[in-house]
Image (cartoon, helix red, strand yellow):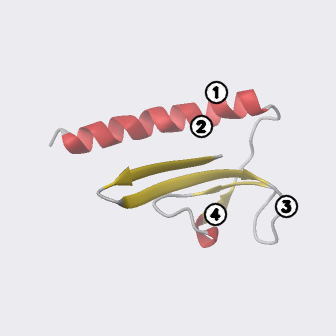
Amino acid sequence: MTYVETHHETEWMARWDRHDSADYTREHFHAPPAAHHEDGEDRSYPVSLFDVLSREIVPWIYERMGAVWEEFDR
């Protein structure tokens, strides 16, 4: 799953991956702002995609939305 924001024509992204990797465990996360390969960190996700979305990704996006709104409220 890839999350992408665009601000002033600049992309800000994060990735939740589940695939074989020589550098990370099968389940891993690539952190913002660029989600490059070297930004990866090992993670452990629930088995079902629905649970990954509801427990990992949606709460993360919700927190990110709050951070973005807070940035614009300054």
Q: Residue 20 shows which numbered tag?
A: 3
**Badge 2, how many Cα within 10 Å: few under 14, some, many 20+?**
some
For disc 4, the neighbor class at 10 Å (few under 14, some 14 to 19, many from 20) is many
Question: Which x, y percent locates residue 44?
Answer: 75, 46
Residue at (45% x, 60% y) in the render = 33
Q: Secondary structure at mark 4?
A: strand
Earlier sequence position, callout 4 versus callout 3: 3
The kind of residue on which mark 2 rests is Ile
The amino acid type of the residue labelled 4 equals Gly
- The total number of labels drawn is 4
**In the image, what residue type sits under mark 3?**
Asp
When the figure is inspected, residue 28 is found, relative to residue 44, above or below; the finding is below
Percent of width and height locating residue 29: 64, 54
Mark drawn on residue 40: 4
Circle nearer the N terminus (4, 2): 4
Element at badge 3?
loop
Disc 3 versus disc 2: distance between alpha carbons?
A: 20 Å
Tell me the CA gap for discs 2 and 1: 6 Å
Q: Which residue is mark 1?
A: 54
